Image (cartoon, helix red, strand yellow):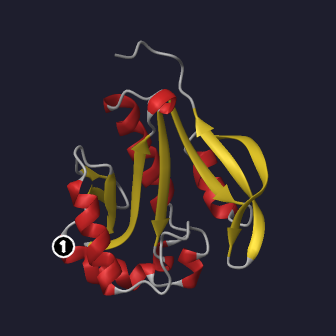
Amino acid sequence: MIRRLTLSTLRPFRPTDASSIASHANNRKVWINLKDAFPHPYTLAHARSWIRLARRDRPTTYFAIVIDGVAGGGIGYRVGGDVARRTAIFGYWLGEPFWGQGVMTEAVRSLVGWILEYRPVHRIEAGVFAWNRASMRVLEKAGFRLEGIQRHAVFKAGRTVDRHLYALTPPPRRLP
């Protein structure tokens, strides 16, 4: 999938994205809002490893967010298993130089629309650390609703914090 948007393009990661991804991901302000599986410091080796992993998925579920020809972030989802097989878990990150420009809101809306059109899911959910108000606002602008606050649910950077659970549940439709 390649989606050309007004502010960016969503496309599968390419090996040539590694240096740009490493540069934008190696930022504590990015890392602080992500799971610990996203390392810090973030090196070129981490970027190359991630791109290899992301390129294996079929269909593609992780996409580069490309702004002015530069891979400045990532967005993706994974579909749950077993009884959660109709739920997509959603995540994203963006390099700091691109914050506050509407890039992520546009990317989230676009990928959510694509997931709902082409994947057999009836729920998309995303967790956000309590301090990340900007990400909460992105999800709200994309139609997600706060379903609840999971008290003391995550431990990040030496702190135990709440996790806000957002979900988008479109009107029911007949699923295969």
Name the residue nearer the viewer: 176 or 145. 176
The residue positioned farthest toward the top in the image shown: 174
Residue 35 position by quadrant: bottom right
> Residue shown at 39%/63% (left/top)?
74
Q: Which residue is mark 1?
A: 15
As rendered, which of 73 and 70 lies closer to the eye? 73
Q: Vertical placement of 139 versus 115: above or below?
A: below
Q: Amino acid at mark 1?
A: Pro
Q: Is residue 68 visible?
A: no
In what element is the residue under mark 1? helix
Percent of width and height locating residue 86: 45, 29
Observer able to see residue 88? yes
Q: Is residue 29 left or right of residue 6?
A: right
Q: Is residue 71 left or right of residue 153?
A: left
Where residue 89 sits: x, y (%)? 49, 45
Judged from this view, the residue extending furthest toward the front is 82
Vertical comparison of 162 with 52: above or below:
above
- Left or right, 48 with respect to 119, comes to left
User: Which residue: 18% across, 76% down?
Assistant: 16
Q: Residue at x 32, y 77 (%)?
A: 47
Q: How many residues crowd mark 1 within 10 Å: few (<14), some (14–19), many (20+)?
A: few
Quadrant in the picture for residue 160:
bottom right
Describe residue 3's horizontal placement relative to residue 143 as left or right.
left
Q: Nearer the viewer, residue 47 or 136?
A: 47
Q: How many marks?
A: 1
What residue do we see at 26% from left, 76% from top?
48
Q: Position of residue 8 (x, y in %)?
A: 34, 61
Above or below residue 34? Residue 173 is above
